[in-house]
Amino acid sequence: MSSHNSKEAASGVSLALIIGALGVVFGDIGTSPLYALKVSVEASGAKDASQIVHAVYGILSLITWALIIVVTLKYVFIIMRADNHGEGGIFALTALVSKDMQKESKYRWLVMIAGALGAALFFGDSMITPAISVLSAVEGLKVLSPDLETFIIPIALALITALFAVERFGTAVIGKVFGPIMVAWFLSLGLMGLAEVINTPAIYIALNPMMGIEFLVEHSGVAVAIFGAIVLSVTGGEALYADMGHFGRAPIQRAWFVVVFPCLLLNYFGQGALLIRDPAALDNPFFRLAPSWGLVPLLFLAAMATIIASQAVISGAFSIATQAVQLGFIPRLLIKHTSAEEIGQVYVSKVNIFLFIGVVLLVLSFKSSEHLASAYGVSVTGAMAIDTLLAGYFMIYIKGWNKLVFLPLFAGLFLLDSIFLGTNLFKFFEGGWLPVTVAGLLLFVMISWISGRERLLKARWKHALRLEDFLKTLDVSEPHRVAGTAIFMVPHGHIAPVSLLHNLKHNQVLHDRVILMHVETVNEPFVPDEQRLTIEHLPHNFHSVHVRHGYMEEPHVMRAVALLRAREFHFSLMEISFFVGKEKVVAKNTSSLLMAPFIYMHRTMQSATEYFKIPFEHAIEIGGLVEV
């Protein structure tokens, strides 16, 4: 169980955790009122005043029930119960579903591909969210003065550049102010909406779901466009599940019901009431809600809220990339931990550069949040559909929930996700191609790496010498032993490492103590220190050490060595030598579509010495050739 969850169990739900959740979890969905209602009404084709007024009631009804069904029912009540020792997100769900499946099972492969696709779609979302959020906030300048429109793109690019530039410093310090700012943001949303709703109480008839259904029937010709726009109101809903490990289930649920959900509804209904009173406000109903004296403060607060929302999504991308490395979905990357207290705060420079370039290109290409809305939605709805499928399987077939009740329920939720996804795919040529392309390329990279890694492991096994057989050869003729401890990093604890065989062949010596260390990432986010090591003592002063760490943890070998020293061996750090295999992989079939990128990634990825944080002065890398 994560530290947050254990605290929660011990002392209840603290106000600090709820405020923290507001600052990190709800940034994306909390900034949706900036554009969601406007884009949805325009998607209905409403032009004159009477059409806009009629559209407002139907659109509000659809937004309300989308928030109730997709976010409240699916994520808050159901999917957040599928936690992996307190952690949520697509990889936690993938690990839960695949945990009991055989490695050779075709179903396990399908689950892994689904997890990889969900992660790839998340990366597409991570590029679009900063672009659309920051643009929509800065576009409030047009309400202040139409002459300021020319400054929108430069200011948005400046904010985005600053956002990505400070990512390497981590959120440990600035994270403390995120919560209070988002509290102010949500209270402003609610109060602005309430002030307008009080003057137009009739707007509440839009709570009736039939109004939304009737509106869709009347506008069947543009129903696809309407659904594609409505989904903008629930983007960020998946973050409730993905960020569960940081705060725990209860604080996120409380924050949603007490603050976020009511404030979002009040603001949407306030915008609707304003449009009924003044249909001309459709140019920017969100900022038109503010009194003239509050427009500049609201612009500043909106910019802060969108930066926080963007930062949370970017940090989420770093976390997803880290988990993908740990679970073997992508090659090793240089990962920097930015906080000594919070293990989840990481920075991945390659991901940061990739996202920054993508966001800048999006802003320069689409130029407005309205145009970007066409690209938004595909990645989010695709990820939501995968969440529903995997969660449904886990709840019904692994946790044993009642099939008669939950099979129809999950089928209905998946049908709704499919409708949202299908309607967004209709926007493919208007910008929807972008997240699909990004997700497709990333999925190809992941599948190439996973399949190549499987072949590499099989190739190692094919030519491997069993450790048991190697130790028997030492019974017959033992080479010269030299002082010190040699630690060999091995992919499996029962085979003799190639680096050991090469060292023995060329140097004809063995160290007095030989430790074969196998590091494994398990399908759990964290592993307690008392369960981290398994030590097996073998003949000839050989020792097999199995080190486990969770997919949310940093694989720091020196911490394992410290545990070894405390528990079993009393050796000096100065007498340790780490032997690390450095393989050169070549392909049997050079025309293989998947093997070529795998070999390139294998040759250019971060070395095992750097990845396992082995001190360079103690590391010896020994090469070999492996054909896959």
Image (cartoon, rainbow, N blue to C red):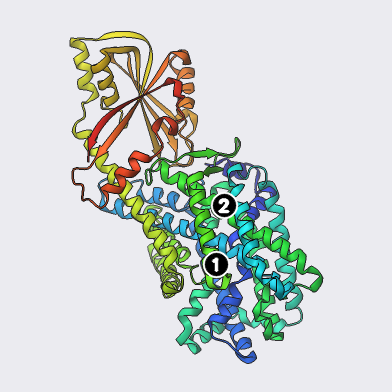
Reply above or below: 32 against 92.
Answer: below
Query: What residue type is disc 2 on?
Result: Arg
Left/right placement of residue 164 relative to residue 495 reads: right
User: For the residue carrying disc 2, how many other residues have a C-alpha within 10 Å: few (<14), some (14-19), or many (20+)?
Assistant: many
Where on the picture, by quarter, is residue 221?
bottom left
Quarter where residue 427 is shown: bottom left
Q: Residue at x 63, y 91 (%)?
A: 50
For mark 2, give the secondary structure. Answer: helix
The image shows residue 281 at horizontal and vertical percentages of: 68, 81
Residue at the image position 32 percent from the left and 51 percent from the top: 447
Query: Total label count?
Result: 2
443 w.r.t. 176: above or below: below
Q: Position of residue 209 (x, y in %)?
A: 55, 80
Local crowd size for mark 1, using a 10 Å CA cut-off: few (<14), some (14–19), many (≥20): many
Residue 582: x, y in percent? 32, 30
* Disc 1, SS: loop
Residue 331 in which image quadrant: top left
The residue under the point 72% across, 85% down is 277
Type of amino acid under label 1: Val
The residue tagged 2 is 249
